[in-house]
C-alpha cells in the first residue's frame, strides 16, 4: 500500500468512528428523554389532582438531569383525559418531554445544528388513591 491509500483509510476510519460516536450518543439522549418522560408521567399519576400532577411531572423531569443536557432546558407538556366516570381517579395522564441537543455535544467535535428528541408517555391515575 502506498502512503496515499493509508491516508485515505485513516480519514475514512476517523469519519466512521465519529459517526458511530454520534449515533451512540444520540441513542443515549433518546434513552434519557424516555426515562424522564416515564418518571414525569408516573409522578403525575400519583398526584391528587391535575394541578398537582402538572407540577409533579415538571419537577420529576427537572430532577432527571435533562436540564444540563438540553439546550435551553427540556420542554414538558402535560395533559389528561378523565376516567369513564369523568373524575381524576382512573384518568389517563400524558406527559411529553422534548429535548434539543447540540450536535457538537453528540459528536465531540464541531458539528453544526441541533437534534430534537421528543418522547410521550402515558400512565393511569390510580383509582383508589386519595
Image (spheres, grey):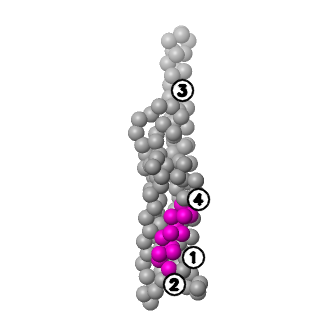
- Asked whether residue 48 is in view, the answer is yes
| Residue bearing mark 4 | 63
Q: Secondary structure at mark 4?
A: helix
Give the distance between the C-alpha atoms of the residues marked 1 and 3, in whole angstroms.
49 Å
Give the main secondary structure of the magenta stretch. helix
Which residue is label 3 attached to?
14
Q: Which residue is mark 1?
A: 46
Q: Is residue 53 magenta?
A: yes
3D distance between C-alphas at marks 4 and 3:
36 Å
Q: Is residue 6 above or below residue 70?
A: above
Magenta residues (range): 49-61
* Camera-nearest label, 2 or 4: 4
Tell which of 53 and 82 is nearer to you: 53
Name the residue carrying label 2: 89
Image coords of residue 11 (percent x, y): 51, 22
Location of residue 64 with respect to 21 vertically, above or below: below
Q: What residue appears at the point 51 percent right and 40 percent down from the top-left corner?
A: 106
Between discs 1 and 3, the one toward the N terminus: 3
Callouts 1 and 3 close, C-beta under 8 Å: no
- CA distance for labels 2 and 3: 55 Å
Mark 2 and mark 4 lie on one chain; the one further toward the N terminus is: 4
Where is residue 88 shown, x and y percent of the image?
A: 48, 83
Neighbours of disc 3 within 10 Å: few (<14), some (14-19), many (20+): few
Q: Nearer the viewer, mark 4 or mark 3?
A: 4
Amino acid at each position: 500500500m502506498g502512503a496515499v491509500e493509508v491516508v485515505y483509510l485513516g480519514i475514512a476510519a476517523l469519519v466512521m468512528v465519529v459517526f458511530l460516536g454520534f449515533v451512540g450518543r444520540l441513542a443515549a439522549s433518546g434513552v434519557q428523554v424516555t426515562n424522564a418522560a416515564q418518571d414525569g408521567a408516573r409522578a403525575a399519576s400519583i398526584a391528587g389532582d391535575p394541578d398537582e400532577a402538572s407540577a409533579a411531572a415538571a419537577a420529576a423531569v427537572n430532577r432527571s438531569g435533562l436540564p444540563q443536557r438540553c439546550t435551553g432546558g427540556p420542554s414538558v407538556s402535560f395533559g389528561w383525559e378523565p376516567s369513564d366516570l369523568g373524575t381524576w381517579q382512573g384518568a389517563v395522564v400524558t406527559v411529553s418531554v422534548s429535548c434539543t441537543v447540540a450536535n457538537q455535544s453528540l459528536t465531540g467535535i464541531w458539528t453544526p445544528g441541533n437534534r430534537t428528541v421528543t418522547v410521550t408517555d402515558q400512565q393511569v391515575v390510580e383509582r383508589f388513591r386519595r
